[in-house]
Image (cartoon, rainbow, N blue to C red):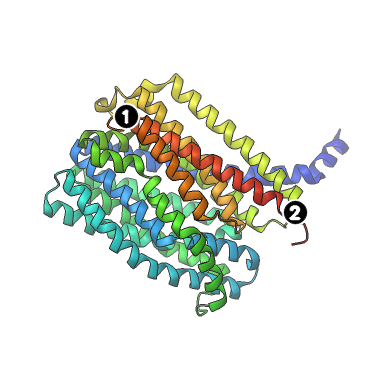
């Protein structure tokens, strides 16, 4: 028996399974803590902020996501793609990182010029006072600038699978955010206070991320024109789609903020907080799977096999989540508070949309990690058709109607990306 056990332990597949088990457990445990603190912070803010203030908070957070996407424009994918090719070379990896950071600074100015006027207009539509609008915009800036660098800095330890310090940093940021939000919003239940409590911990966390990146990348290197050209190629392919997704990806909030009421905005924001639980799987995927997929050799059979395993796991996971939401809607809505207790149907639609977005995002990350980006001339018209169809066939003046339209749009994006990924996968040559 002892000899059999030793042979099993020495088997390559067992060793690989054990390695993955340790990584998933370590990363998963940290992410449970990170997402738990994020969820608790979100729930605390939902319960402490008045309905109108939480509507403002939802609009500001939505615009923060838009600003971050515009400021990225495909830069992080370009850094991951280029870094995956030379990840063992500290000097070259430093050039890639520095080049990406410099490009993102330039894109940040464009992002601010576009997003801030839109946020001001949406807040004005919801009858926010001028001084409230000024405070909200000012409080959003720290979170925005921290978001400019953290996704790029995280790329370096992810490529080297230096997971433990990365997860520890995220956990510390989450705990500090929970403490700061609880202490401040309890006393001052205002949107700008909640936004500052979210941004300050991220800034502190970025200092630690920079130290992690320095272990593997020499950031004293100058901007490299070759890497800049390659990253900009990715940006040119992704930016039109990113601009479109800024609109379509948050179309629920846009439509509700223009056509709906302040209460409806707060309801959408509150329901999306429960969908944050899925973020743990997104982070696990981005930390453990995407970098390995980016580093994998160009072998059609290997890539196809890995992709099929990933899809099976993701679909199974989403089915389990939907089952839990279907069976226990009242218990889940209790978390949000009594003002949201009658949204069981909307909850199911909201989580279904989040599950579709999760799978779509995973396929998109896998695709861009290999440098495969769908032509915007194809993706934007196809997605516009689904948006128009949703507006025509759904009653978008209601909460459920807007959520159903979001499901329709997400389904269209998923099918398009899946078809594109399969086409690119079939075109892989083992010797390329």
Pointer 1 or 2: first along the chain: 2
| Nearest to viewer (mark 1 / mark 2) | 1
**Is residue 103 visible to the viewer in this orientation of the structure?**
yes
Q: Is residue 44 above or below residue 368?
A: above
- Quadrant of the snapshot with the N terminus: top right
What percent of the width, then of the height, locates residue 265? 26, 37
Q: Quadrant of residue 107?
A: bottom left
- For the residue pair 173 and 249, the one nearer the viewer reads as 249
Q: Which residue is mark 2?
A: 299
Q: Which mark is residue 395?
A: 1
What percent of the width, then of the height, locates residue 117? 23, 57
What percent of the width, then of the height, locates residue 95? 54, 74
Horizontal placement of 140 versus 204: left or right?
left
- Quadrant of the snapshot with the C terminus: bottom right
Horizontal placement of 162 versus 336: left or right?
right
Horizontal placement of 126 versus 7: left or right?
left
Secondary structure of residue under mark 1: loop
Secondary structure of residue under mark 2: loop
Mark 1 crowd level (few <14, some 14–19, many ≥20, 10 Å Cα): some
Q: Is residue 404 above or below residue 202?
A: above
Residue at 69% from the left image edge and 56% from the top image edge: 296
- For the residue pair 30 and 329, the one nearer the viewer reads as 329
């Amino acid at each position: 028996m002892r000899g059999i056990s030793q042979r099993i332990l020495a088997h390559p597949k067992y060793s690989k399974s054990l390695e993955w088990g340790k990584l998933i457990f370590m990363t998963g445990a940290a992410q449970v803590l990170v997402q738990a603190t994020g969820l608790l912070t979100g729930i605390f803010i939902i319960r402490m902020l008045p309905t109108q203030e939480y509507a403002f908070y939802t609009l500001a957070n939505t615009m923060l996501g838009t600003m971050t996407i515009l400021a990225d424009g495909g830069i992080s994918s370009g850094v991951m793609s280029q870094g995956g090719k030379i990840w063992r070379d500290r000097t070259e990896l430093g050039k890639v990182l520095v080049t990406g950071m410099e490009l993102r600074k330039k894109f940040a100015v464009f992002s601010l010029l576009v997003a801030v006027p839109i946020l001001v207009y949406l807040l004005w539509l919801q009858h926010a006072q001028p001084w409230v609008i000024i405070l909200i915009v000012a409080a959003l800036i720290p979170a925005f600038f921290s978001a400019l660098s953290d996704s790029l800095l995280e790329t370096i330890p992810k490529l080297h699978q230096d997971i433990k310090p990365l997860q520890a940093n995220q956990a510390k940021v989450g705990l500090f955010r929970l403490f700061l939000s609880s202490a401040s919003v309890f006393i001052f239940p205002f949107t700008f206070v909640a936004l500052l409590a979210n941004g300050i911990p991220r800034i502190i966390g970025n200092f630690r991320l920079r130290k992690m990146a320095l272990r593997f990348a020499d950031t004293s290197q100058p901007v490299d024109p070759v890497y800049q050209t390659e990253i900009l190629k990715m940006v040119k392919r992704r930016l039109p789609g990113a601009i479109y997704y800024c609109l379509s990806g948050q179309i629920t909030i846009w439509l509700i903020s223009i056509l709906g009421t302040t209460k409806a905005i707060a309801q959408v924001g509150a329901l999306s907080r429960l969908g944050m639980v899925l973020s743990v799987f997104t982070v696990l995927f981005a930390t453990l799977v995407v970098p390995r997929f980016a580093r994998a050799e160009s072998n059609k059979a290997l890539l196809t096999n890995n992709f099929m395993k990933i899809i099976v796991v993701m679909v199974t996971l989403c089915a389990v989540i939907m089952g839990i939401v279907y069976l226990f809607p009242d218990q889940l809505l209790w978390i949000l508070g009594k003002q949201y207790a009658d949204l069981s149907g909307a909850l199911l639609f909201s989580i279904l949309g989040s599950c579709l977005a999760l799978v779509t995002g995973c396929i998109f990350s896998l695709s861009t990690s290999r440098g495969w980006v769908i032509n915007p001339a194809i993706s934007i018209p196809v997605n516009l058709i689904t948006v128009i169809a949703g507006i025509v066939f759904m009653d978008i003046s209601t909460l459920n109607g807007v959520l159903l339209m979001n499901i329709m749009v997400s389904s269209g994006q998923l099918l398009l990306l899946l078809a594109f990924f399969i086409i690119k996968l079939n075109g892989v040559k083992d010797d390329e």
